[in-house]
Amino acid sequence: MFKKSNNPDIAVLEKSYRGRTFSVSHLKVLKIENARFCVWCHEGKLNHGNQRWCSEECVSSGLAWANPQSEHGLHILLVKQNFKCLHCNFDYLPYVEKALSYLNRNHPTVDKAKIRNQISALLMKVMKRNIPRDKAPEVDHIIPISKGGQAIGLDNVGILCYSCHKMKTKVDNSGPRKKK
Ligand SMILES: [Zn+2]
Ligand SMILES: [Zn+2]
């Protein structure tokens, strides 16, 4: 599902980058002599001049990492936490299943066998339409960025429903902030 990156820049960014999103166009292709390798895994060989990613899996992992708030991030995080809000256990799975059957009816050519990569973004988009507003899935920084928590990537984020996120944000904003 989520493929870890072998690009050393990723580990550096996880420590130092303070923004919430990162543009993947800044990631560099690995060049060894005349060969070029995937910006994300640094393993998959690239075949033509402007290719940057070796696979769908690398693209969705990279996009999720760079923007956990995106549909790619949402999907990977929901799978990781068994489709439940980390605080109240609100279950998103029925909504995912509903979205999937909608896609089956309306986009029959998409390969639903794999609920990942190319359809994950579409699936999440459809899913979000049916969720009550106070249960909308939101990406929370487990250790707040203001208190020194990792800002980018998927290690310090989880999905909370809107209500739980609102409550947690109140708590997060109280107490001492990390000195700059
Ligand atoms: Zn790759
Ligand atoms: Zn909740």
Image (spheres, grey):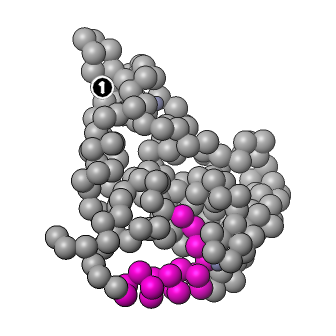
Residues drawn in magenta? 158-174
Q: Which quadrant of the figure contains the C terminus? A: bottom left
Quarter of image, res 28? top left
Crowd rating for badge 1 (residues with CA inside 10 Å; few <14, some 14–19, many 20+): many
How many tags in the picture?
1
Residue 179 lies, with reference to residue 34, above or below; the image says below
User: What amino acid type should be assigned to the residue bearing mark 1?
Assistant: Leu
* Furthest-top residue in this view: 33
Q: Answer yes or no: is residue 23 visible.
A: no
Depth order, front residue of 51/8: 8
Q: Is residue 161 found inside the magenta-colored segment of the image? A: yes
Residue 118 at what x, y percent from top left? 61, 45
Observer-nearest of 116 and 89: 89
Q: Along the line of sight, which residue is nearer the eye, 17 or 108?
A: 17
State the residue at coordinates (52%, 38%): 3
Q: Find residue 87 and report its image quarter.
A: bottom right
Residue 25 highlighted magenta (yes or no): no
Q: Residue furthest left?
A: 180
Question: Who's the residue at 70% across and 62% down the image?
Answer: 83
Q: Which residue is mark 1?
A: 30
Quadrant location, the N terminus = top right
